[in-house]
Image (tube, grey):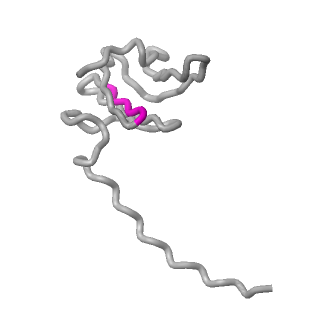
Amino acid sequence: MDAMKPMEPMKPIKPMDGPDSSWWPQGLSNPSSSGSQNGVRYAFFPDQHRLAVEQDGKAKQYDTGEHRISGVSQAQGSHGGSLRFTSQNGDVDLELLKEVH
């Protein structure tokens, strides 16, 4: 049997990226909720009624109207996956939100 090797020293934690390196479009304030699932990232900006979604390296933003987004789920189907977001009014499909350019 080999003797136990000493543990390697811990590596320093990488600092979080600052606001200039955010993946969402410029002009959006700090999100109230954000997350990622299966390679898709989202961030919700309640003050601006905007939802930013990044899929396949492309970020888009959507008008959420009165919806206050708090979570995301993905449904897999025969025509690919669809994104559904949780709001105070229940679930809302991404396809139902208007894309903002």
Horizontal side, residue 98 vs residue 94: left or right: left
In terms of image quadrants, where is residue 89? top left
- Please report the residue visible at 56 percent of the width from the left and 17 percent of the height from the top: 79
Q: Decide: is 96 above or below 48.
A: above
Could you say where residue 9 lies in the image, as x and y percent from the top left?
51, 78
Main SS category, magenta section = strand
Q: Decide: is 38 above or below 9.
A: above
Could you say where residue 44 lies in the image, as x and y percent from the top left?
34, 30
Q: Is residue 54 magenta?
A: yes
Q: Is residue 96 magenta?
A: no
Q: Decide: is 95 above or below 17.
A: above
- Please report the residue visible at 32 percent of the width from the left and 14 percent of the height from the top: 98
Horizontal side, residue 80 vs residue 63: left or right: right
- Please report the residue visible at 43 percent of the width from the left and 28 percent of the height from the top: 70
Is 79 in front, or is 24? 79
Magenta segment boundaries in residue numbering: 51-56
Could you say where residue 55 lies in the image, as x and y percent from the top left?
41, 32
Is 46 in front, or is 81? 81
